[in-house]
Image (cartoon, rainbow, N blue to C red):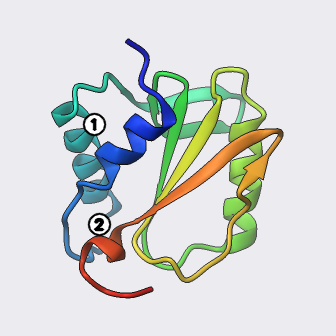
Amino acid sequence: MTPSLEDVIAALRTIRMHSTSDEYQIHVAVSTALTDHGIDHAHEVRIAERSRIDFVAGRVGVEVKRGKPNTAAVAEQLERYCASDQLDAVILVTERGLFTYPRECNGKRVERVVLSKRWGLAT
């Protein structure tokens, strides 16, 4: 069964981890959460030239950003991902919720899961 956007978000919202200096640790947590919820996924998927997204689960892309990413660079990256025929939606997984991002691009939904909210912090 192909996972829905809501299925993938629900799995990602179960991640409980402290702030990290290593983005790879977040990748491991994302993969574990998806696996624990029975969601098949692939890591580091090339979806177009110059566009490799961190995870694809069905037709949902997942991009991980740690720290405080450059808003303009993230928006540009999301535009490239949303231009792909392989994806219907993209989820941005961030450590903190202190920057803006497009909620839709190229007619596709963009959602965000903020890990610091899982720490019990208000951001």
Which is more N-terminal, label 2 or label 1? 2
In the visual, does 52 lie left or right of 33?
A: right
Relative vertical location of residue 68 with respect to residue 83 in this rendering, above or below: below
What is the residue that sits farthest to the bottom in this orientation? 122
Q: How many marks?
A: 2
Q: Which residue is mark 2?
A: 22
Q: Amino acid at mark 1?
A: Leu
In the visual, does 50 lie left or right of 52?
A: right
- Residue drawn where x is 55% and y is 24% of the image: 59
- The x, y position of residue 116, in whole percent, is 34, 76
Image quadrant containing the C terminus: bottom left
- The x, y position of residue 106, in whole percent, is 83, 40
- The x, y position of residue 109, in whole percent, is 68, 44
In the visual, does 30 lie left or right of 6?
A: left
Q: Amino acid at mark 2?
A: Asp
Image quadrant containing the N terminus: top left
CA gap between label 1 and label 2 equals 19 Å
Looking at the image, is mark 1 or mark 2 nearer the viewer? 1
- Residue drawn where x is 67% and y is 74% of the image: 100
Q: Which residue is mark 1?
A: 34
Contact flag, marks 1 and 2 (Cβ < 8 Å)? no
Relative vertical location of residue 65 with respect to residue 58 in this rendering, above or below: below
